Amino acid sequence: MRAGVIGAVLIVGMTAPTLTHPTTVGRVDTNDGRFSIWNIAWIDHALTTNPVHLLDANIFYPHTGTLAYSELNIVAGLLGLPWYLATHSPLAALNGAVGTALWLAFVLMWALVRRLSGSDGAGLVAATAFTFCPYLGARTAHIQLLMIFAFPMVALAFHRMRDRPGVASGSVLGAALAISALACGYYGLFAGCALAWLTLAFASRSRAYWTAILAALGMAALVVGPVYYVFAKARALSGASSQTHPIESVRGWSANVTAYLASSSAAHEWWLPRLAAWEPWSEVLFPGIGVIALAILGAWSLSSAGDERSRRVVWAYAALAILAAWASFGPDAGLYRLLDRAVPGMSLIRAPARFGVVVTFSLAVIAGFGAARLAAWRRWTPAFLVVLLLAELGIKTPEWGWPSWPLRVASAPSAAYQTLATLPRGVLVEFQFPYVSSNYHNHAQAMFWSTYHWQPLVNGYSDVIPPDFDAIALPINGFPDPASFAIMKDRHVRYVLWHVDYYQGAPRDVLLDRLARYDAYLRPLVKTPDTWLYEIVRWPE
C-alpha cells in the first residue's frame, strides 16, 4: 500500500503535466505521439460503442481490420479505458494509460526487489531507478514502449513460481508473459528471452519446476495465439507484403557505444554535445549514474558476503544485463543473429537497440541489493537514495520546467471537426493528402483529429500500407477532377476537408479554380480562414 501511494505521488510529479493536465496535453508535436493518442482513443471508443468491430479502426477506408496494421496496444487501451469513461477525452485516455502503466512498473519493481532482497526500502530505490530511467523519458511519444511494467511483472511471477512450483504458479507466469506480449511486441519477445535465461539460471531438478515452466508456455500460447492469428490474418487481408525485417536491414537500428551514454535526463545534458560530436547515438540507453553505482555496490558486497541465494540472484541478473547489451548491438555483434534464428517472431522487430531496456531493468534489480546493504547501515538511506535518483533522472522542458515531460497543450478542435462530430456517418478525406511514402506519417494529423468525430477516413498511417492506398495517394490530390471523383465514388466518400492554410500562391489558385468548376457537386458546410469542409452531393457523369 505504501509503495503504491509513493509511486503515484512520484509519477504525478516526475511526469507532469501528464496527470496534472490529462485532458489538455499530449505529444501532439510529433506524428508518433498523435498516432499513439489516436490508437488508445480508438480502442476505448470501440470498446464503449461497438466492441465487435474493435479491429476495424477508422483509417484506410474501406479496409477492415486496420487496427492490426500496427501494434494493437490492447493492454494500453484497457489501462486508459477508465480515464476515457470519466472524461471522453482522447488525450486523457492516453495520459491515463501512461500514468497507470508507470504506476504498475513502480509497484511491480518494488515487489520484485523486496522479494529478492528482503528490504522494503531497497524495493523503493530500485522502483524509482527503473520507472524514471532515461530510456523512458526518450520514448514519451511511443505508448507501447512505455509499457515497461512487463519486465518486473514477468520476473516477479517467475520467482514466485520458482519458490512454489506448480501448474497454478506456472499458469500465472504464462499469463504475465502473455500480457507483456500484448502490451508491446518488443517487450513480449524480450521478456520471453529474459525468462528463458532465468529458467536456466535458476533451474531445478524438481519435476514440479519443469511442469510449471510447461504450464507457463501453454498459458502464454493459449492467450496470445488467438490474438496473433486474428492480427496476422488482418494484415494478410491488407494485401501488403510481409512485415518481417531481414536481419541485415536492422543494422541501422542497433545500439552503438554512445547509445549507452545518451540520456534524456536534465542532469546529463552537459555531456550530450560532446557525445554527439564523438558519434551520434542510435538510442537512449544510459541507466543513470546512481543505478550503476548502486549495482556495483550490490555486486561487490555480495561477492564476499551475503547468502548464497542473494549471490545467485545478483549474478543471474548481471549475466542477463550482459546478454541483453550484447544482443542490443545487433547482427554484427553475433548474439542477435542467433536469436533471430532461434526465437519465433524475432524477425518482426527492427530495433535490436531496444534490448537496452533489459539492461537497465537488470541493473536496477542489482542496485536494489546495493540499496539493501546501505539500508542495513542506516535505515534512512533508502529515502535519501530515492531523492538522489529523482534529482538525477528528472527531465526538464522549457514549457513546464523541472521535473516534467515534453508534452504540448493541444489546440481545440476546429469548427470543421466540431461540425463533423454532429453530421451523419460518412467517409472523410482530408487534404493535403501526403502521397510520398516517406511522408505518409503526416496522415497521423488527420487520425488525431478524427478522435473528436470518429468519421471513417480514407487517410491513414501505420506499419502496414495497403497497396491500393499507394495507388490512390497521388491522383486523389487532384480533387476535384474526373480521376479523383472516380476514386472518391469508389470509396463512398461523403465529406472532404481542406486545410487551406497549407495552400498558398499557385496551388491555392488551382484549388479555387477546380472548386468553381465543380461547385454543382459540392456543398460547403464550414469555411474558415484555415479549413473548408464540403459534402459531395452528387457525382459527375
Image (cartoon, rainbow, N blue to C red):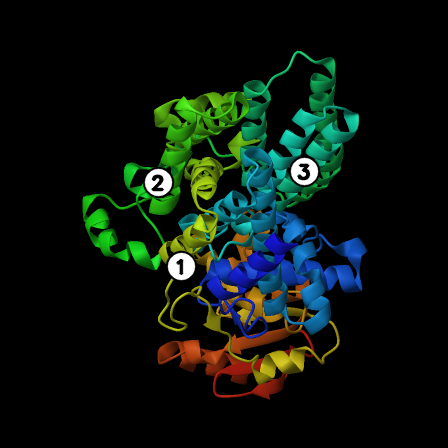
Q: Which of 447 and 483 is in front in this view?
A: 447
Residue at mark 3: 176
| Element class at badge 3 | helix
Residue at mark 2: 293
Q: Which residue is drawn at 50% across and 43% down?
A: 122
Asked if the residue at tag 2 contacts the one at tag 3, i.e. Cβ–Cβ closer than 8 Å, the answer is: no
Question: Gap between marks 3 and 1, in whole Å?
Answer: 29 Å
| Element class at badge 1 | loop
Residue 429: x and y in percent read 59, 69
How many other residues sit within 10 Å of disc 2, few (<14), some (14-19) or many (≥20)? few
Type of amino acid at the residue the image marks with label 2: Ala
Q: Which residue is drawn at 69% across and 58% down?
A: 43
Type of amino acid at the residue the image marks with label 3: Ala
Residue at mark 1: 394
Type of amino acid at the residue the image marks with label 1: Gly
Q: Can residue 71 be seen in this view?
A: yes
**Circle 3 or circle 2, nearest the eye:** 2
Residue 47: x and y in percent read 76, 59
Relative to 103, 133 lies left or right: left
